[in-house]
Image: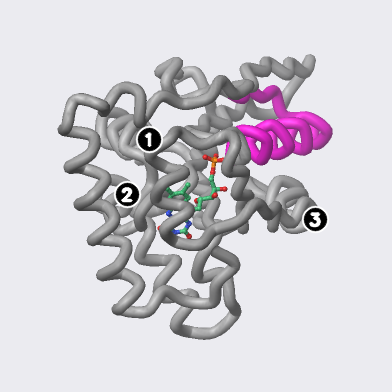
């Protein structure tokens, strides 16, 4: 999946695979097919005395690569003097406990994971009042050309229905087939995806080194 852009034909193919996957999930084998291999979910509280701000870094993930990016962002923010909590969004952190929020999700079939979109929808009135940054982790549409930019920006269409003031950043992610559920591996194999780690730790640290910089 180390692509350039997803063509219309590829989108139709993805939609077709999605339908096949849905039929499979509904066929009674759903639980086994979607059961996720166990992955580590970082849950960090990086306290700083006299911190200027307390920042929440909340993430969703399936195979763990977004969680590792969230942890790195949290550590860099902590080095900058912020108090930071890095938490899986499934823990339902309360944005009211923070002065700034970073939310991150991988892309699956063209969208942020549903639990993160639900979190944003449920907390939108709190999030609207806070400095907010969103990081997206993806494998396709990573190019510098206009079409790739347009395609990756469309990944956040459902999110922008609920928050509009956020800074947005996009990071290339990682495919690790052994960490996927049977169903995700089935889809990935159909897409001819292979194991690869495209994460650019310099880009991730550069973002974390400057986000919420008021100076
Ligand atoms: C089933 C499946 C569907 C995916 N769909 C997309 C997609 O539509 N667009 C894209 O850019 N990346 C897509 N990806 C790539 C993931 O966003 C990428 O592997 C990400 O790093 C996974 O994050 P995680 O390890 O936190 O789950 C897909 C990956 C899988 C396994």
**Cα–Cα gap, marks 3 and 2:** 26 Å
Q: Depth check: 183 or 147 in front?
A: 183
| Left or right, residue 87 beside residue 187 | right
Residue 5 higher or lower than 42, as above or below: below
Q: Position of residue 148 (x, y in %)?
A: 48, 77
> Residue 169, which numbered label?
none
Q: Where is residue 115, by image quadrant?
A: top left
Asked if disc 1 and disc 2 are in contact, CB closer than 8 Å, the reply is yes
Residue for point 35% across, 23% down: 32
Name the residue located 43 percent from the left edge and 35 percent from the top edge.
182
Residue ID for mark 3: 202
C-beta proximity under 8 Å, tags 3 and 1:
no
Q: Which residues are magenta?
A: 66-86
Mark found first going from the N terminus, 3 or 2: 2
Task: Say if disc 1 is inside 8 Å of ligand 1.
Answer: no
Instruction: Say which residue label 1 marks.
Output: 116
Q: Is mark 2 within 8 Å of ligand 1?
A: no
Residue 36 at x, y percent in the picture? 46, 26
- Where is residue 200, by image quadrant? bottom right
Outermost right residue: 79
In the depicted structure, whether residue 143 falls above or below residue 201: below
Q: Which mark is residue 159?
A: 2
Side of 180 where 114 appears, left or right: left
Dot 2: element: helix
- For image coordinates 70% across by 23% down, the residue present is 83
């Amino acid at each position: 999946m180390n692509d350039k852009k997803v063509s219309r034909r590829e989108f139709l193919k993805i939609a077709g695979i999605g339908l096949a996957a849905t039929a499979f999930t509904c066929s009674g084998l759903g639980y086994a097919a979607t059961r996720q291999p166990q992955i580590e979910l970082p849950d960090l509280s990086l306290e700083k005395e006299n911190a200027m701000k307390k920042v929440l870094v909340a993430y969703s993930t399936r195979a763990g690569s977004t969680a590792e990016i969230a942890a790195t962002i949290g550590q860099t923010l902590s080095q900058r003097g912020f108090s930071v909590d890095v938490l899986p969004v499934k823990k339902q952190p309360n944005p009211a406990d923070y002065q700034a929020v970073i939310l991150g999700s991988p892309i699956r079939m063209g969208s942020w994971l549903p639990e993160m979109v639900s979190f944003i929808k449920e907390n939108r009135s709190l999030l609207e009042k806070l400095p907010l940054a969103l990081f997206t982790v993806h494998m396709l549409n990573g190019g510098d050309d206009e079409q790739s930019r347009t395609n990756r920006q469309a990944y956040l269409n459902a999110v922008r229905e609920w928050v509009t003031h956020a800074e947005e950043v996009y990071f290339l992610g990682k495919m690790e087939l052994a960490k996927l559920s049977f169903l995700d591996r089935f889809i990935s194999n159909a897409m001819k995806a292979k194991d690869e780690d495209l994460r650019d730790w310099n880009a991730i640290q550069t973002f974390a080194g400057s986000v919420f910089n008021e100076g």
